Structure formats: structure tokens, C-alpha cells
Amino acid sequence: MTATIDAETRAYYAHYGENKWAAARGHLDETTRLAAEPVIEKYTGVLAGADVFTKSTAFWVMESIRLDLGYGSRVHA
Amino acid sequence: MSATDTAALPDYAPLPETARGPALNEQGYYVGRVERNLYYVTDGTYMCAFITTSDGVVVLDAPPTLGNNIQRAIDEIASANGVSNKVEYLVYSHHHSDHVGAASLFDRNVTRIGHEETRNLLLRDNDAARPPNEETFQDKQSLVIGGERIDLAFHGPNHSPDNILIHLPDHDTMMLVDICNPGWVPIYRSNLSEDIPGYIEAPANALAYSWKHFIGGHMGRLGTRDDLALHQQYMADISESSRHAIDTVDPTPYFVKYGENYWAALKGYLDECAATTAAPVIEKYTGVLAAADVFTEDVSFEVMQSVRLDLGYGAQVHP
């Protein structure tokens, strides 16, 4: 899984080169989409608007898990 | 995403020359002198700093992407100058993992200093990579370490609830992390900031101090007062444009189309407000600030929401 994430992250940075914000956008948007997808599927028909706003909620939760909790942080060797 | 999908990724404007920093070495970092015994270290995306003193080295932030390269940079400078490479103090700008997630690399006896809310949040987050700072302050603290002065100040929540100003008056330097990325626009929603009025006010707080060099915590080069002023103007333009969008975008078609699905109508309306806010700002800043075409719509959304919710602009009271 980690290797997959690494490879996918590298693909964005390879594509955009020195435009690091473009690469970060591609990578984090895709991560958000993957986080939201199963939740949208589970809650559509259960909670109204699940297909409207779950992606933006997933983005902020993911950022908190990354920045507040430190999940997925890797220290340069 | 697979490698073949990269063809479907959007194209963006070329970077302005002002976005570029110095070339990195083989280990993936660059260390440069800010002034006298104050140095900055960057990997091109993240930046921290250190001061070599007669009482040991003071490190200002420890981003994990730099990780062990921080000590390598210190070793390189200490060896060249014949001074101690032993880190004795670590100052946290704020609690976020991407700026202090390498804090545990340093000896556990290092003195860790930061805002009292940084300690509270690190205790809450309970991450072994970020030992909570034992030394705290509320509004201001002036440190003198090995004869070098470091003034810490908290002007209220901004990017995070605990983000502080680190002023080095004897080095003509201001360190304020995650507000202005010199040469670049903020990432996503105002650098993922929690308090937008505080985020917008932060550059003015920093500019009220005397300094020449700016350490923003991101990207490859040091900043200047002009960089902070340009960032301030960019944010002011977004604030002004968002008021125009709130005044002119008509929500009616969205509520007619979506009927009782209020969230769908609201999303359509607010997304159009953000796009309307961003359009003239993207045009003005493309070629001036890197990635203006990548993230201005996101920044605009968050600023427009703050103008609406924090400032109450455009609120209409039911008759």
C-alpha cells in the first residue's frame, strides 16, 4: 500500500516538475477522492447530501489526520 | 492514478522566476546563511532554520521532509566554522506535524520551547514524533541563548490556534510559518488555515516589527518585506473580489434546479461565488505568484466564507 502511494505521489511530482503546488494538488485531490468514495457509497440514501459534500468533508478530515495527528508522516532518512 | 493518466492532468502556467530557490545538494537539501550565525535549510518545499551559539545550536522547527538533513546541515556549517553542532534548543512555530514532525530526532534532553497552546495540542495529539514543548509562554517571551536574542510573540489564532511570530532582531529576521510562501500563492484554502481573519491579519503583525529577511516555512528561498506585502495585496484583492461576488451572484437558479436538496443548491451557488471571486485575481497574479492558477479558487472559497460568516457581509434578515 505504501509503495503504491509512493509511486502515485511520485507520478504527480514527475509530471509537474518544479510546479510543486500543482503536484500537491493532483496528489491530495486523488487521495481525497479515494477517501470519500466508499463513504459516499455507504451513505447515499442514508444521509441527504452525501454525494454533494462528503468529498470536501473528507479533505478536511484527511488534512487533520495528517497535520494534527501526524498520520503518514515520514521522516527523511 | 496510473502513469498513463498523467496525460489527463490539467496544464498550468509556467512559474515566474521569483518562485525558484537555490539548487539542492545530492542529499536533497540546501543550507544558506541568513545573517551572521543564523542559517536556513530547505528541501525546496519545506524550510526551517538554526542558530549556532556558544550555548549550542537552536533549531527553529523540524519538518519531517528535511528530517536527518537538518542535522547534516548543522554539521556542515559547524564544521566549516569550528563551532558546536550539538542541538540544545528547539523552538516550535506551531504544532502541525509537517513543520515539527522530526522533533523526536533530537536528544530528549533538548529544551523545547513554544506557545502554551502548542503544548496543549501536542498533548492532545499524542504523537511520539512530536514531544510536547515543556517551556511555554502566553503572549510574549524574549529568549537570550548564547548571547543571541529570539523574541517569540502570539497575536492570536491565525493559520492554527497556536502559530507564533519568531523575531530575531539581531539577525534582521522574521520567521512566520504557513502564512506567506515567498513567490507562491497559499496552498488549498489559505494554506489550510483555521482562522481566516487571523490569517489575513498576520502579515501586518509581522510587518510591524523591524526586519529584512523572512522565513516562511515553505518553498526554496528566503523572503523579504516585499514578498509579505505582495501576499497581503493578493489576499486583499481576494477579499474585495469576494464581496463583489456575494453582491452579484444569483443563487435563485440553483435553488430552482435542486428544489428540496438544499445542500446541492448551496454547493452550486457557493462554488460559483468562489469562481467569480477568483477569476480577476487569477488574471492579475498569473506570472506574478506561482500557482495562482492552481489554488486561487480554493483560497477564494475560504475567504468568501469568512467574509460571509465571520464578518457578516451580505447577510439578509428575513423581513
Image (cartoon, rainbow, N blue to C red):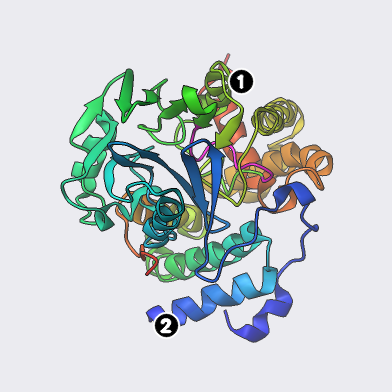
Residue lying at 63% horizontally and 38% vertically, measured from the top left = B223
Which residue matches tag 2? A3
Q: Residue B71: within the magenta? A: no
Question: How far apart are labels 2 and 1 at the CA level?
Answer: 47 Å
Between B35 and B164, the one lying in front of the other is: B35
Q: Residues within 10 Å of mark 2 (few under 14, many from 20)?
A: few
Q: Residue B180: within the magenta? A: yes
Task: Tell me if B305 is positioned left or right of B268 in this view.
Answer: left
Residue B127: x %, y % from top left = 22, 54
Residue B307, compared with residue B46, is above or below; it is above
Residue kind at label 1, given as amino acid type: Tyr
Q: Chain of mark 1?
A: B
> Which residue is most to the front?
B82
Please identify the dominant SS of the magenta region: loop
Whether residue B290 can be seen here? no
Residue B55, compared with residue A61, is above or below; it is above
Which residue matches tag 1? B313
Q: SS for tag 2? A: helix
**Residue range corresponding to the magenta coloring:** B175-184
Q: Chain of mark 2?
A: A
Residue B40: x %, y % from top left = 50, 46
Residue B41: x %, y % from top left = 50, 51
Q: Residues within 10 Å of mark 1 (few under 14, many from 20)?
A: some
Residue B16, compared with residue B229, is above or below; it is below
Residue lying at 56% horizontally and 66% vertically, measured from the top left = B25
Q: SS for tag 1? A: loop
Residue B32: x %, y % from top left = 55, 49
Quarter occupied by the C terminus of chain A:
bottom left
Whether residue B81 can be seen here? yes
Residue kind at label 2, given as amino acid type: Ala
